[in-house]
Image (tube, grey):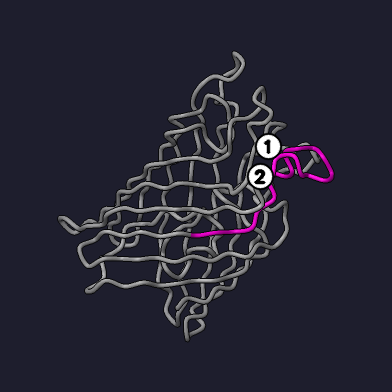
Amino acid sequence: MKLKSKLLLALLATSSAAFAQTAPAAPEVTYNVGVVSQYRYRGLAQTKGQPALQGGVDYANANGAYLGAWASTINWIKDQSGNPAGSNYGGKTELDLYGGYKFEAGGVGYDVGFLRYQYVGNNLNSNPASYANANTNEIYGAMTFDVYTFKMSQSKTPLFGTLQSSGSMYLDLTANYDMGSGITLSPHIGRQTVGGTNANVSNSQYNYTDGSLTVAKDLGDGLSATAAAIYTNAKSAQFTSPSGYTIGKSTVVLGLKYGF
């Protein structure tokens, strides 16, 4: 799960779907590896407050088409089991596969694409009364004007294991301010709405808002560092794992990434 400004991407601990950017003058392949103090996606904990290893590869064509893959260690699926051994639901790695097309018109950058969240080896749906399979498909579209990017994502399958939740939406607005000296300041706000009805109860109980403020520093030679203050209002019982961990509590995430 990654926000795509090349400096911020995996370090912000969000997902692989890209923000609108200008296509390169020629086809290019880039790689990134990194570590974060914990992995947060849309403000929610993916590693129960523990560090995560992350990395990815991106292909961008001069015509605006792009493909990519990104992976991170996770343990949120294990934590759903309520089993200290955590073996019955599997899914220790998130693999995001995405592709899309970027273009500009009238001074506005556009980005449309598809994103597959693959939680490798997960069988969350082995408890079909409580969960669907965690693997999720989304389509997305983004518009960038000046330093501002507005993005809309819609799930085409149940959202991250939530039963009967196809069509869920995530809206977010992010700005990237160049502060000089290789420093970027990025405020962000997002709203997750979860569609459908599960066991005669509306999935809207899982709706929440998240926000973050990230400072990124380009250290040179492909190395960058970030510090992100993250807030959500997802603090109800619906956002507490079986182990008692509140996945939406406010935190600060530190990251270091190397791109080449």
Q: Amino acid at mark 1?
A: Phe
**Which residue is the extreme one toward the right?**
84
Q: Quadrant of residue 145?
A: bottom left
**Where 133 sits versus 68, above or below?**
above
Q: In the image, 191: left or right of 227?
A: left
Q: State the residue lying farthest toward the left.
A: 106
Task: Return the mark for residue 248.
Answer: 2
**Is residue 222 highlighted in magenta?**
no
Q: Residue at 65% of width from left, 62% of height from top?
A: 52
Q: Nearer the viewer, residue 251 or 58?
A: 58
Give the quarter of the figure containing the C terminus: bottom left
Residue 72, percent from left and from top: 59, 59
Q: Residue at x 22, y 67 (%)?
A: 62
Question: In terms of secondary structure, where does tag 2 sit?
Answer: loop
Residue 85 on the magenta span:
yes
- For label 2, the crowd category at 10 Å Cα-Cα, with few meaning under 14, some 14 to 19 and many 20 or more, is many
Q: Which residue is mark 1?
A: 239
Q: Is residue 217 above or below residue 165?
A: below
Chain part drawn in magenta = 70-90
The one of 195 and 88 positioned closer to us in this rendering:
88
Q: Are marks 1 and 2 in contact (CB under 8 Å)?
A: yes
Q: Amino acid at mark 2?
A: Gly
The residues bearing labels 1 and 2 have C-alpha atoms spaced at a distance of: 7 Å
Q: Earlier in the sequence, mark 1 or mark 2?
A: 1
| Residue at (69, 33) in percent of width and height | 236
SS class, disc 1: helix
Q: Quadrant of residue 33?
A: bottom right
* Image x and y of residue 112, in percent: 30, 49
Nearest the camera: 165 or 247? 165
